[in-house]
Image: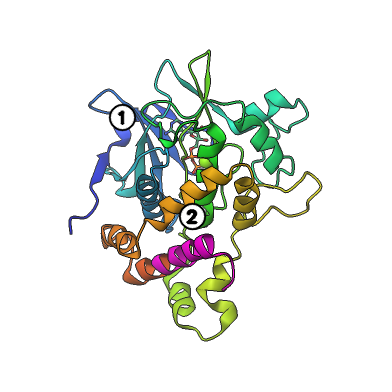
Amino acid sequence: MTPFDIIKVSSLRREKLEQLGTKSKYWFTDDDNRQMLFKAVKGDTGEDWSEKIACELCRLLDLPHVHYELAVETEEDKRGVVCQTCAPPPMSLVLGNQLLFALDANYPRDHGRKYKVHQHTVEAVRDVVRTLKPPPTPYATDISGTKCTALDVFLGYVMLDAWIGNQDRHHENWGALTDGENLYLAPTFDHAAGMARNLMDEERQERLTTRDGKRQIAYFARRARSAFYKDDVSKKPMSTFDAWHAFSQFSSEATMIWLRRLSGVSEASVRQLLETVPNDRISDVGREFTLRLLMENRRRLLEGDAP
Ligand SMILES: Nc1ncnc2c1ncn2[C@@H]1O[C@H](COP(=O)(O)OP(=O)(O)OP(=O)(O)O)[C@@H](O)[C@H]1O
Ligand SMILES: [Mg+2]
């Protein structure tokens, strides 16, 4: 099987650091004159393969997404991913915190905090996403013919988060594209925090083989928390599954469509994706653990939550 391509990036082409987000990253123009972002892996984590695998899972679901490739910055042999801007001129990206603030001037847009924002509630996000148009070309998806709304598509993002255990859908990890006149839901991006990409292989191995129920993957999978709150007095953010159940109330049709798409993604196709990650970026135990985690969450989504 041919491994994923690795794009070579040179820091000499760096034009602008991207200030938002926690990872070190910068923008450059590639040979085809496209604005590209290089995101370096933090420490020794698997943020490169988790971003790439999540992107490929989005493709299998036909979910509007930013496309990532594995990359290496040649000067320092630094692992990472690259993606193209999803907002080439005349488009620009308006992030969730700005959209929420536009609808409610009390929303803490500028607190410099992305996590533990209790006002980032399911209802507030729904109210914003309802005002958007669905993602434009080339991100459009034909999820329910002409009636597809931005909220229908957003449900797919929340289902993806539950599937991959993405705890990072905070208010700067979703947004809208604007041409100055219209606002469209932006494709989903920044999934590097999913799939327990920062576990050590020893822990993965132990969780794969232990007899202790509380150490097993089924139990571990249930710990994933979203960045959504049920309401602004809730103390803790919702689990990724509670967030999915809450959003899925907004459209039974879109829920059915996304679940049907998920059921169409076989274990063999996920295994094949994981095997396509080069051996120097993921170990066999990393592949096996990730596969088991994805299959457990897929089962929970499709069959309900009983272990
Ligand atoms: N493909 C893209 N097109 C346009 N803007 C982008 C794109 N990817 C990232 N950005 C911008 O860069 C910011 C940081 O990128 P990203 O969220 O991928 O990084 P991060 O460091 O992983 O963030 P976090 O702290 O949420 O983990 C985003 O919030 C967004 O404003
Ligand atoms: Mg981010």
Q: Is residue 296 magenta?
A: yes
Q: Is residue 55 magenta?
A: no
Neighbourhood count class around disc 1 (C-alpha, 10 Å): few under 14, some 14–19, many 20 upward? few
According to the picture, the residue beneath numbered tag 2 turns out to be: 194
Extent of the magenta region:
291-307
Q: Earlier in the sequence, mark 1 or mark 2?
A: 1
Q: Position of residue 195 (x, y in %)?
A: 46, 59
* Residue closer to the observer: 17 or 109: 109
Disc 2 marks a residue whose amino acid type is: Gly
Magenta stretch: helix, strand or loop mostly: helix
Residue 224 placement, left or right of 120:
left
Q: Is residue 12 visible?
A: yes
Q: Position of residue 36 (x, y in %)?
A: 35, 31
Quarter containing the N terminus = bottom left
Q: Position of residue 251 (x, y in %)?
A: 59, 42
Check whether the beta carbons of the residues at disc 1 and disc 2 lie within 8 A of each other: no
Colour logic = rainbow
The CB of the residue at mark 2 lies under 8 Å from ligand 1: no
Q: Quadrant of residue 45?
A: bottom left
* Residue closer to the observer: 158 or 27: 158
Circle 1 SS class: helix
